[in-house]
Amino acid sequence: MLRKTQGFSGKCRSVLRRRTTLELLANSTWVSWVGVALIGGALFLLGRVLQSEEDSRAAAEALSDSSQRTSTHAFIRKVRPLLNQYFVPIVRGKGTWENTRRKAKRDLISAGLRDELTPDEFIALKFFLVLFFPVTAAVLKALDLVDAGPLLIAGASVAGWFYPDFWAKGRMQRRQTEILKAMPFVVDLLALSTEAGLDFIGAIGRVVEKSKGNPLVEEFEQVLREIRVGSSRQDALREMGQRINMTEVNSFIAILISADQMGAPIGRVLRQQSEQIRAERMLRAEKAGAAAAQKLLLPIFLFVFPAVLMMVIGPLVLGMIYGGKT
């Protein structure tokens, strides 16, 4: 009986030891998983901290760079810190926006906005206006200043995305118009300077020094800067043509480059180009005058002609009406 009792107690102790071992293993497995989870969480937090520091450093660099750039547009000056802090990181370094970034860069250069906005800031401005326009419309509706429905607020969001494109296009067209107006005078000065004995680079320097500020003179000043840092004259002129992006300027630059390569006298080429530019300017003025005359036909027919008709025929009609009664 004693032996049976001892054997049963031994079996119980072995079962308890196995159960304790299994519990320890289970507890150790649970502890291991908890440790792995804690290590993973620590690594995740560390990565987030490093990423936030990188974003903060990039934002600080963008803010310091933007503080050194001045803008002629008051709205751009006000919202640039906000763009660089919250919206530029959305598009910076993303390959999805590469085509949009390339197009924005070309439009900004042609519009003369290269020093005011970077391509990333331009895209960020579109995101900002997508939120700013509908919020402004909703605030005006809340103040009962405008009757803005849901469709108008949604349309304001769409308009916010496309407004920077129209703004840059308008600036580009105004700049190109100013360049067309300044071309005959500037080319005449270049021709006079080269005929007086200066080389082409010296003539450009004289024009930049003596002429009033306009986009064409600014572009020639940029050409001088590029030549001084080591660029060739032909490459600097080609870059100027790409920046302005006008058929007239590209033709003028192509003729100058061809004359330079062939060794033709620059002064005579400039004189011929000046006469051709003035003739083309006169032709454009005549076309604009003819188009304006055609546009005036409709308002004349609707407003002026009825008034003249009433002044001429009105007294005769009134005389016939009232003269017959008397």
Image (cartoon, rainbow, N blue to C red):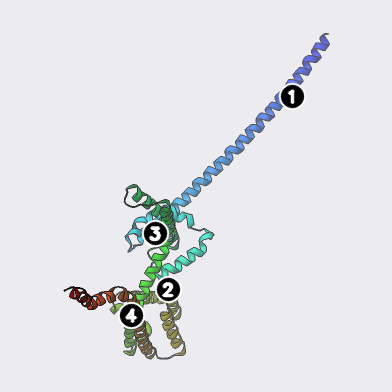
Say which residue appears at 41% left-offset and 81% top-offset.
248
Question: Real-space Cα distance between discs 3 and 4?
Answer: 50 Å
62 vs 47, left or right, is left
* Label located before the other in sequence (3 or 2): 3
* Mark 4 neighbour class, 10 Å CA radius: few under 14, some 14 to 19, many 20 or more: few
- Which residue in the structure is indicated by mark 1? 18
Coordinates of residue 251 in the picture (x, y in percent) = 43, 83
Tell me the element at label 4.
Answer: helix
* Mark 2 neighbour class, 10 Å CA radius: few under 14, some 14 to 19, many 20 or more: some
Whether the residues at callouts 1 and 4 have beta carbons within 8 Å, the answer is: no
Which one is closest to the eye, mark 3 or mark 4? 4
- Which residue in the structure is indicated by mark 2? 243
Question: Real-space Cα distance between discs 2 and 1?
Answer: 83 Å
Q: Which mark identifies residue 293?
A: 4
145 vs 23, left or right, is left
Whether the residues at callouts 2 and 1 have beta carbons within 8 Å, the answer is: no
Question: Real-space Cα distance between discs 3 and 2?
Answer: 23 Å
Give the amino acid at mark 4: Ala
241 vs 37, left or right, is left
Say which residue appears at 32% left-offset and 80% top-offset.
207
- Which residue in the structure is indicated by mark 3? 65
* Label located before the other in sequence (3 or 1): 1
